[in-house]
Image (tube, rainbow, N blue to C red):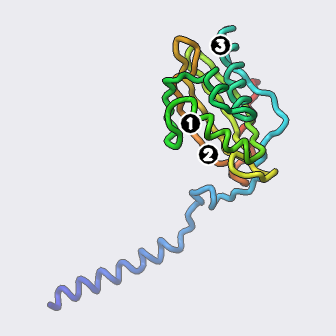
């Protein structure tokens, strides 16, 4: 019994200095909150859409992608969506069912209630694949200062030139950032 007690006491005595040392050593900040979200995030209102396309067909498809967003922003009816979206449309966003009608219904509900704005910042097209970097503003509110939801939409076209499949990645635009770059601007310049 005495031997066990001594080992426990020895363990406690040696552990105390280690814990105290660990608490006194400063550790570098590891999260953006600790580093300081000290840059106000800005959302550009005056910008030119960047189109990345190699062929005339790709440029035409990029123009069509921009048209889709204009329709979603102003007149997202099932009839209008069927001009661009296949009846066999496969939707990978977990909140929207397949087909052009659910997409039209979701956006028409927002457009009827709020001053929806969709800013298309970049469109990239390569053959049957297209991607767009967009900001959806005022989809669920009428706040004039709404920073929106940043999105990258990925589209696959079918042989008839209709959008057949869609994936997206969405992120709310925060008020502050750990860097001054914003979420939408292209800042890199070749030397």
Q: Mark 2 — residue? A: 171
Closest to the observer, 43 or 9: 43
Q: Mark 3 — residue? A: 58
**Identity of the residue drawn at 62% across and 61% down:** 34
Q: Residue furthest left?
A: 1
Q: Secondary structure at mark 2?
A: strand
Above or below, 109 against 65 in this view is: below
**Identity of the residue drawn at 51% across and 26% down:** 89
Give the number of the disc on residue 40.
Answer: none
Q: Quadrant of the C terminus?
A: top right
Mark nearer the viewer, 3 or 1: 1
**How many circles with numbers are drawn on the protein?**
3
Residue 76 found in image quarter:
top right
Residue 179 position within the rendered picture, expressed as x and y whole percent measured from the top left: 71, 48
Mark nearer the viewer, 2 or 1: 1
Give the number of the disc on residue 102.
Answer: 1
Whichever of callouts 3 and 1 sits on the residue coming sooner in the sequence is: 3
Closest to the observer, 81 or 67: 81
């Amino acid at each position: 019994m005495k031997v066990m007690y001594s080992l426990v006491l020895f363990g406690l005595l040696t552990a105390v200095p280690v814990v105290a040392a660990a608490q006194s050593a400063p550790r570098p900040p590891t999260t953006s909150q600790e580093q300081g979200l000290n840059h106000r995030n800005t959302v550009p209102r005056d910008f030119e859409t960047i189109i990345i396309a190699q062929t005339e067909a790709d440029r035409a498809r990029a123009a069509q992608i921009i048209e889709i967003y204009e329709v979603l922003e102003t007149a997202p009816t099932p009839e209008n969506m069927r001009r661009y979206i296949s009846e066999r449309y496969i939707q990978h966003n977990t909140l929207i069912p397949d087909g052009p009608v659910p997409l039209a219904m979701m956006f028409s509900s927002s457009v009827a209630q709020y001053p929806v704005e969709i800013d298309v910042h970049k469109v990239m097209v390569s053959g049957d694949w297209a991607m767009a970097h967009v900001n959806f503003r005022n989809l669920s509110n009428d706040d004039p200062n709404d920073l929106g939801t940043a999105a990258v939409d990925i589209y696959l076209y079918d042989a008839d030139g209709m959008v057949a499949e869609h994936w997206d990645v969405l992120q709310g635009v925060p008020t502050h950032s750990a860097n001054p770059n914003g979420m939408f601007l292209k800042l890199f310049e070749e030397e």
